[in-house]
Amino acid sequence: MAGYLTTHVLDTARGRPAAGLRIELYRIEGDGRTKLAEATTNDDGRTDGPILPEADFATGSYELVFHAGSYLDVSGVPGESPRFLSEIPIRFGMSEETHYHVPLLLSPFGYATYRGS
């Protein structure tokens, strides 16, 4: 089985999936990065398919950028300007040809992530 990458976002302050949040995926190489994909979360807080499908998968270093500030603005969450969390970059490595899942648990003043299943 070839590898692939999925993600989802949960709005822990509101206790529901974060729908409409833009996510970008980059491959990290040396001092640079290359944009591979962009997606927006659906009503379940997930992308409609893998953000990095099997056909495009390669081991290496990657970065997901979650556009939290824009999501919080549209969601009506009161906040200061600029927001405490605007963009959340998560850098991680994928060393095996398997399924990687990198979720984000989001609130206006904090976040958490982990390697999911």
Image (tube, grey):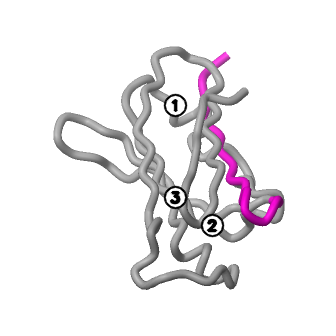
- How packed mark 3 is, by other alpha carbons closer than 10 Å (few <14, some 14-19, many 20 or more), is many
Comparing 27 with 18, the one in front is 18
x then y, percent, for residue 47: 70, 54
Say whether residue 15 is left or right of residue 101. right
Q: Secondary structure at mark 3?
A: strand
What kind of residue is marked 2? Leu
Quick one: label 3 or label 1, which is nearer the N terminus?
1
* Residue 1 versus residue 65 in the image, above or below: above
Query: Which is more foreground, mark 3 or mark 1?
Result: 3
Earlier along the polypeptide chain: callout 1 or callout 2? 2
| Residue at the disc numbered 3 | 66
Choose between 68 and 21: the one closer to the eye.
Answer: 68
> CA separation, marks 3 and 1?
20 Å
Q: Could you tell whether 49 is left or right of 70 in the image?
A: right
**Residue for badge 2:** 21
Q: Are marks 3 and 1 in contact (CB under 8 Å)?
A: no
Check whether the beta carbons of the residues at disc 3 and disc 2 lie within 8 A of each other. yes
Q: Which residue is mark 1?
A: 57
